[in-house]
Image: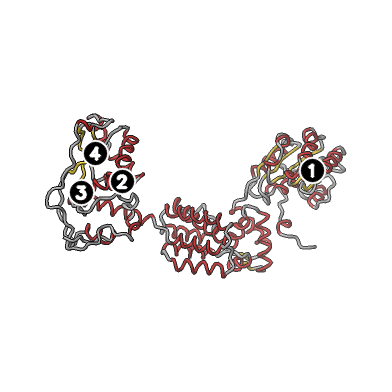
Amino acid sequence: MSYLVTARKWRPMRFDEVTAQEHVTVTMKNAIIRNRIAHAYLFSGPSGVGKTTTARIFAKAINCQNVKDGEPCNDCDVCKEITEGRSLDVIEIDGASNRGIDEIRDLRESVRYSPARLKYKVYIIDEVHMLTKEAFNALLKTLEEPPAYAMFVLATTEPHKVIPTILTRCQRFDFKRIEIEKIIERLRFIAKEEKISVDEESFVTIAKKGDGSMRDALSIFDQVAAFCGNDIRHEVVVNALSLVDSELFFKTTELIQNNDSKGAVELAAEIVSRGYDTVDFLEGLSEHIRNLLIASTTEKADLIEASEDYRKKYLETAKKFDRLDLLRLLKTTSEAVQQIKYVSQPRIKLEMTLLQLVNMERGVRLRELLQQVDELKKNLTERKVGIGATQSPRPAQEEGMASPSVRENRPAFSERKGPHVAAPSRPVPRPPNKSAEEKPSHAMSESAFQEINVRWDEFLLSVRKERIGVWSQLINMKPLGVQNGWLMLGAPNEVVIGMTKPYKTYIQDAILKTLGARVAIDFRIVNTEQPVDTNSNDPLVKYLKDEFGAEPLES
């Protein structure tokens, strides 16, 4: 007997053998048992999931001489004829090559004749969406009122291309993609029957490569078996299918964790030298980061399509990354997958993507810096320290206050050198009080002030979410009261006032948005400052030197 590919040799012969389509097969069996058989069915779904196979089993079941519980016996002459494709009363038509109106007219003529031998005459039209509009219209009347002995099963991968008048005349069943576990289970059964030794990682690789299609997975299994013989191992499967080794993805995330730019460039060279397709690598990297994100989010590996060993490895690796970092990494790789398909030099794009990933600022680091800034502000308030009072104020970079690393190349203080930062020997003059003539257009009442004073922390939280640079100044302030209709905010020194004034309009709008009060604000200094000894071991001074590059001013 000539060789049969695995997909044909192990084609399901009964409804119970069809993988992962129980919602279809159980309904079909019950319809046969209860004699509620429709005259037209539409099977839709991805390729290789069992649409045509189910149609053939249905044709056998309704004609079988020894049908039992809705299942064909596969032993009678009728079942054997249909299985071997010899039955004159089961007609399979390829809609792609018989799509014209003339072919459908021939079909309509043949429907008029009774079955040659069987009880029912079954027409299986594959890829029915390929029929022309005229052919659909020619089929319409026959499909609506066929003879009692005629049954139609239409199969398609694109049901949206089937005209509505055809859809409404059929019972529709949507076949689904087959889960990887189901494909592995079937592959394991076939390998055992064929006496082929396969390791678990190879099963996973083949099933994933099938992408939800049992037929595609079985075809890949044939290809691998031809290459490896009766002993299939994962490292050989990777070479046979030109797949990117999973260890390469773990190596990539290790480089990202270590911010290793040199290693990223060398990795890009390794990918090219091995002959891997850059798109395949980035798509695999996206899936790899997605697996890490799933492991980090759920703290389980059930949703990861990998072997048990790799699932454990994903759980361990995910602990080393922040969840928000993984989201940013996944976004970057997904965008790179789309862009690299259209660039003229994919290698350069690959190198740029890897360098971007390894140099991406970590969220953990950002949170540490935010915490340090919080401590800095707390120390400023508690110690009433004036920093650079002689320096002319300038607007703060809104994000620079939250992330000192952004400003690491720019000195935060004057280049002038000296033993210490000198504060003024006399109190900093307060801004003049607003006169009655300067009363704002939106004068503030005492009751509104009390509401703002109570909800000030809520207001600060909303500002932090929008503009952390403004928030870093406002946390040093507090509402003092109402003067001539102005909301007065108390600040520790002139520097804080100078850095906050450029954002007065934003602060007023934010108060209206968050607290519902339309106000005009002004500032007042509520204390005086003391000099700071820059030669001391004060942690605040050390932080300013280390993180902001600050240097003492000349006296």
The quarter of the displayed image where residue 465 is located: top left
Check the picture and name the quadrant holding the C terminus: bottom left
Rendered image: mark on residue 381: 3
Ranked by sequence position, the earlier of labels 4 and 1 is 1
Could you give the CA–CA distance between mark 3 and mark 4, rounded to whole angstroms? Answer: 20 Å
User: Which residue is at the front of the view, 251 or 214?
Assistant: 251
Residue plotted at (65% across, 53% down): 213
Q: Residues within 10 Å of mark 4 (few under 14, many from 20)?
A: some
**Residue 198 screen position, x and y as percent:** 61, 64
Q: Secondary structure at mark 2?
A: helix
- Tell me if I can see residue 201 in this picture: no
Could you give the CA–CA distance between mark 4 and mark 1, rounded to whole angstroms? Answer: 84 Å
Q: Are marks 2 and 4 in contact (CB under 8 Å)?
A: no
- Which residue is tagged 1? 123
Residue plotted at (24% across, 33% down): 449
- Which residue is tagged 4? 522
| 434 vs 421: above or below | above
Ranked by sequence position, the earlier of labels 2 and 1 is 1
Q: Residues within 10 Å of mark 1 (few under 14, many from 20)?
A: many
Rendered image: mark on residue 470: 2
Ranked by sequence position, the earlier of labels 2 and 4 is 2
What's the amino acid at mark 4? Asp
| Image position of 448 (left or right of 36) | left
Residue plotted at (58% across, 65% down): 276
Depth-wise, is mark 3 or mark 1 nearer the camera? 3
What's the amino acid at mark 1? Tyr
